[in-house]
Image (cartoon, rainbow, N blue to C red):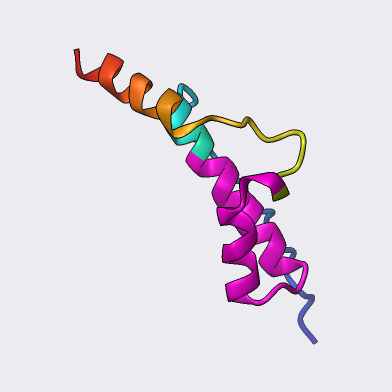
Amino acid sequence: MATPRKRAAKVKTVADESYSKLEQYAIEVHEFYKALRKAGFTNDNALWLVATKESYPDWMQHLSPEDIRNHIEEEDE
């Protein structure tokens, strides 16, 4: 009988660690959504919570749309 092979651990790498504020915000919102889905929330409930800023945890950066808009305008110049 053959011995079972050991699987190599998958390693996630990040290609670029210099994310803009908008990219950081998008990643945080996406991770928040994935955590809600993993916790058992339905798709509709998870999307509702993501859309409601008051439901965000304290550790998330609370960027306003105005902050994001200003940041995008700065990058365009």
State whether residue 24 is above or below residue 1: above
Q: Quadrant of residue 59?
A: top right
Q: Residue at x 74, y 64 (%)?
A: 6
Q: Residue at x 67, y 68 (%)?
A: 37
In front here: 23 or 68? Answer: 68
In percent of width and height, residue 2 lies at 76, 81
Describe residue 35's horizontal placement relative to residue 13 as left or right.
right
Q: Which region is colored magenta?
A: 26-54
Describe residue 45's horizontal placement relative to residue 65 as left or right.
right
Q: Is residue 42 a member of the stretch shown in magenta?
A: yes
Q: Residue at x 47, y 26 (%)?
A: 21
Magenta segment's dominant SS is helix
Describe residue 42's horizontal placement relative to residue 24 as left or right.
right
Which of the image's four quarters has the N terminus?
A: bottom right
Q: Is residue 70 a member of the stretch shown in magenta?
A: no
In percent of width and height, residue 61 lies at 63, 30
